[in-house]
């Protein structure tokens, strides 16, 4: 047995980060598909989570990401009040070079083989058009285009939910939810980040952005010649003087032993998944006087949308649900204060309680 397998089995069966119900390794040599589908929990209902298409350096890295993301979806769906458990899938490879219709159809067949235990949607590297293709082989697919009976781009409500989380953070820390005049840094202005900029500028916030793609930055600066500035990279962004809120909106692990000590922001509230690089970072944030709005709470607008699509999508209904992220975030801060723990731990406790109660009701 290889070291990779040993590592995966240890994570699944022995690690505190494990406890997943099912992990499926998928391969279709004809199309080049290599994928991992991870189902963390179905206590609340069918597992729901997107499909990430990414050129992982190793298969072990891909499996680890699927496990982490699936677990995060269990907590996200629980905190969003959805009747769904947590799952996630990753497709290994560069979507710019290997993504084909044949590959997506093969992937759809694998998802369909799970019989509804896992419902998929978009994530990094996959888009509405991709879900339209997957749905041709799998009815347990959301995030489809309106032309194909879907809700379309979920990044709109994801950004709206993060915006509500920022407002709740401001209310908790400064006694006023207004973001006018606040300086807010956004790392990653792609799918979600560029919508977030619009919310913040509409309210009169000063925005500082960065992105590894020059075109993404240029699009924002051209649209907002005033009120938005750019810095070279994330390292520069987290050190911007006078920053009130930092919003990681790219890949995970943004909050770590190197970044937390040098951050100038008083609040971290962003769209990226798995922002905490490892257990203990949430305490480091608190020790540095930084209020952390748990990522899986504030970025739940997208999953609220794709879940609603399963029952006949209504945008205004979804927006109303996403607006409640404001109240949920405030409740987490209050629980954290009462229990004397960081907000991330408070959110975990609330989510775990809901999942445990659902499992008990099922006699598990």
Image (cartoon, rainbow, N blue to C red):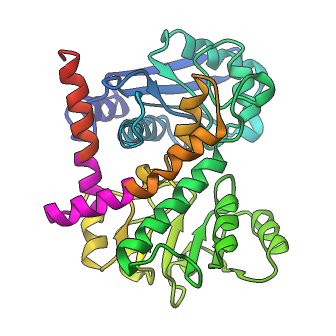
For the point 67% across and 12% down, the residue is: 137
Query: 158 or 99: nearer the eye?
Result: 158
For residue 47: magenta?
A: no
- From the top left corner, tell me how far across and down residue 57 is, in percent: 54, 44
**Image quadrant in which the N terminus is located:** top left
Vertical comparison of 125 with 130: above or below: below
Query: 35 or 229: nearer the eye?
Result: 229
Vertical comparison of 353 with 331: above or below: above
For residue 338: magenta?
A: yes
Residue 53 visible to an observer of this rendering: no
Quarter of the figure with residue 275: bottom left
Magenta stretch: helix, strand or loop mostly = helix
Q: Is residue 209 left or right of residue 171?
A: right
Q: Seen from this angle, which residue lies furthest bottom?
A: 241
**Image quadrant in which the C terminus is located:** top left
Residue 124 visible to an observer of this rendering: yes
For the point 57% across and 75% down, the residue is: 185
Q: How many marks?
A: 0
- From the top left corner, tell me how far across and down residue 126 is, in percent: 67, 37
- From the top left corner, tell me how far across and down residue 320 is, in percent: 55, 46
For the point 70% across and 41% down, the residue is: 153
Vertical comparison of 1 with 49: above or below: above
Q: Which residues are magenta?
A: 328-349
Query: 119 or 332: nearer the eye?
Result: 332
Q: Is residue 278 left or right of residue 51?
A: left
């Amino acid at each position: 047995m290889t070291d990779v397998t040993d590592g995966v089995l240890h994570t699944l069966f022995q690690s505190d980060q494990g406890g997943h119900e099912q992990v499926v390794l998928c391969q279709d040599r004809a199309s080049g598909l290599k994928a991992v589908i991870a189902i963390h929990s179905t206590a609340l209902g069918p597992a729901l989570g997107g499909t990430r298409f990414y050129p992982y350096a190793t298969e072990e890295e891909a499996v680890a990401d699927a496990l982490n993301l699936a677990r995060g979806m269990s907590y996200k769906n629980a905190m969003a009040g959805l009747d769904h458990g947590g799952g996630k899938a990753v497709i290994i490879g560069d979507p710019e070079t290997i993504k084909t219709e044949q590959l997506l159809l093969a992937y759809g067949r694998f998802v369909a083989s799970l019989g509804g235990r896992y419902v998929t949607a978009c994530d990094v590297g996959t888009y509405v058009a991709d879900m339209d293709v997957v749905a041709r082989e799998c009815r347990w697919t959301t995030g489809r285009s309106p032309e194909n009976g879907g809700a379309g781009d979920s990044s709109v409500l994801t950004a709206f939910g993060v915006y509500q989380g920022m407002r709740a953070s401001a209310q908790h820390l400064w006694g006023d939810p207004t973001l006018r005049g606040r300086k807010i840094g956004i790392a990653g202005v792609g799918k979600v980040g560029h919508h977030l900029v619009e919310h913040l500028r509409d309210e009169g916030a000063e925005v500082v952005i960065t992105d590894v793609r020059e075109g993404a930055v240029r699009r924002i600066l051209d649209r907002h010649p005033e009120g938005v500035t750019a810095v070279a990279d994330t390292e520069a962004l987290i050190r911007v003087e006078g920053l009130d809120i930092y919003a990681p909106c790219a890949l995970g692990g943004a909050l770590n032993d190197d970044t937390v000590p040098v951050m100038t922001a008083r609040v971290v509230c962003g769209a990226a998944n798995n922002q905490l690089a490892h257990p203990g970072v949430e305490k480091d944030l608190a020790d540095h006087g930084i209020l952390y709005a748990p990522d899986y709470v504030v970025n739940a607008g997208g999953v609220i949308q794709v879940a609603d699509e399963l029952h006949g999508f209504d945008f205004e209904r979804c927006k109303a649900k996403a607006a409640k992220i404001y109240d949920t975030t405030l409740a987490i801060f209050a629980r954290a204060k009462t229990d004397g723990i960081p907000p991330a731990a408070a959110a975990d406790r609330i989510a775990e309680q809901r999942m445990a109660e659902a499992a008990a009701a099922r006699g598990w």
